[in-house]
Image: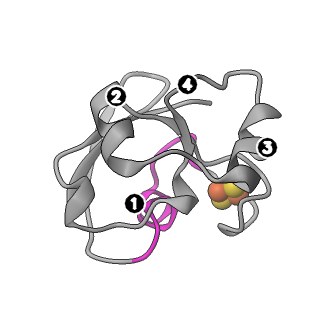
Amino acid sequence: AKVIFITKTNDAVEVEGDSGSLMELASANGVAGIDGDCGGVCSCATCHIYLTPDDFKKVGTPDEIEGDMLELDDNVTQYSRLCCQIEVSDNIDGMTFRVAN
Ligand code: FES
């Protein structure tokens, strides 16, 4: 899948991958603002992104643990996800994600 991250400074970074989590793909490509401090176990929220409403529907809502973690972030919105909890697959091909922090 090919996806685009828009960073806080409005840079568009296109990345490509077939497996692993979206957080791993972003960090491997040095996307600014995706720190992945906890290594992808849903306990840091340094991989917080915003999806478009349509993409959010396709990707799905956060589970309870992810939702609790997101709520600790002041910048949470109804289209927030932690990208370590999103699998890289064809399902997300062509999507654009905005880095939250
Ligand atoms: Fe820590 Fe996603 S990398 S919550």
Q: How many marks?
A: 4
User: Dot 3: few (<14), some (14–19), or many (≥20) neighbours within 10 Å?
Assistant: few
Q: Earlier in the sequence, mark 4 or mark 1?
A: 1
Q: Quadrant of ligand 1?
A: bottom right
Cα separation between marks 4 and 2: 10 Å
Three-letter residue code for mark 2: Thr
Q: Nearer the viewer, mark 2 or mark 1?
A: 2
Cα gap from disc 4 to disc 1, whole angstroms: 27 Å
Tell me what residue is drawn at x 28 percent, y 31 percent. Answer: 54
Element on which disc 2 rests: loop
Residue 48 occupies quadrant: top right
User: Which residue is the site of mark 2?
Assistant: 52
Under circle 3, the secondary element is helix
Q: Which mark is residue 29?
A: 1
Label 2 to label 1: alpha-carbon separation: 22 Å
In the rendering, at what x and y percent does residue 6 appear? 37, 32
Looking at the rendered structure, the kind of residue marked 4 is Gln
Q: Mark 4: few, some, or many residues within 10 Å (few <14, many ≥20)?
A: few
Residue 36 appears in which quarter of the rendering? bottom right
Residue interval drawn in magenta = 20-34
Residue 20 at x, y percent in the picture: 43, 76
Image quarter in which the N terminus is found: bottom left
* Residue carrying label 4: 78
Residue 80: x %, y % from top left: 55, 34
Q: Is residue 10 magenta?
A: no
Q: Quadrant of the C terminus?
A: top right
Instruction: Determine whether label 3 and label 2 are within 8 Å by CB.
Output: no
Marking on residue 68: 3
Q: Amino acid at mark 3?
A: Asp
Instruction: Give the Cα distance between marks 3 and 2.
Output: 21 Å
Mark 1 or 3: the one toward you: 3
